[in-house]
Amino acid sequence: MNTTFATDYSDDTPREAVGIRMVKWTIKIAIALTFSGSIIVLICNWWVVQSTKDQIFFDISELPANDVGLVLGTSKFVRSGKENLFFRYRMEATARLWKEGKVKYLILSGNNDSEYYNEPVDMQRALVKLGVPASVMTLDYAGYRTFDSVVRCKDVFNQEKITIISQNFHNARALYIGNHEGMEAIAFAAQDVPDGYSLRTLIREYLARPNAILDVYILRPQTEKGNWERK
């Protein structure tokens, strides 16, 4: 009596093994890329901060005077409709610098997406309420990004020796761009917001610094050449 033992080896087994190996390799590559990307982001942030730290002033009495201050825009309100403290503190710092003679004229540079969102106009109105005359303000409606605000300050408004006004974390990136453009810039750090106030903003800034390096060395994005307001 012949007994045949048939072993059924289907093609599924080797295919499953190959699939598992591919998944493992994909995971390893993803981990390696994530790790490498994190290191690059950390290095870029360290370089931007370290290369500009001596240009940022926190004490108004130590801040050298300049004719022109470049005020970087931000929204007046947060998404919930509440007051944006970044905006409030930035405007208060700007008004104080002008009143103490640290700047004579102001360029208010911000986004102007539509007639319903106009950062330069919002800044102007806030500063007028704080006692700064509108006659010393020039509004830059095409400051869509920090890169635009800084580059346009030089190319459109012909200002190279300036005082940048924003929060400390933002100033570093603006100064880095200005340095690369050959500008003679310093910055005053407006009062910072409470810890945890806007984690999203801080994370976004952490990622924006590597992008600033790409902008100045590789991408060189085009900026608007004129000063116009979106209607």
Image: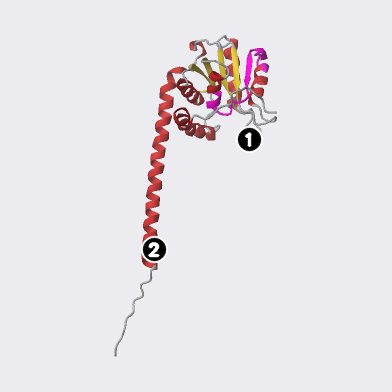
Residue at x 30% of width, y 86% of height: 3
- Magenta segment includes 111: no
Visible residue check, residue 190 = no
* Left or right of residue 229, residue 201 in this image: left
**Would you identify the image quadrant in which residue 1 lies?**
bottom left
The secondary structure type at the circle numbered 2 is helix
The secondary structure type at the circle numbered 1 is loop
Which of the numbered marks, if any, corresponds to residue 97?
A: none
**Disc 2 versus disc 1: distance between alpha carbons?**
49 Å
How crowded is the residue under tag 1: few (<14 C-alpha within 10 Å), some, or many (20+)? few
Outermost residue toward the bottom?
Answer: 1
**Would you identify the image quadrant in which residue 132 lies?**
top right
* Left or right of residue 218, residue 226 in this image: right
Which of the numbered marks, if any, corresponds to residue 79?
A: 1
Magenta-tinted stretch: 128-150
Q: List the residue tagged with mark 2.
A: 16
Q: Please state, as top left, top right, bottom left or bottom right, where the C terminus lies in the image.
A: top right
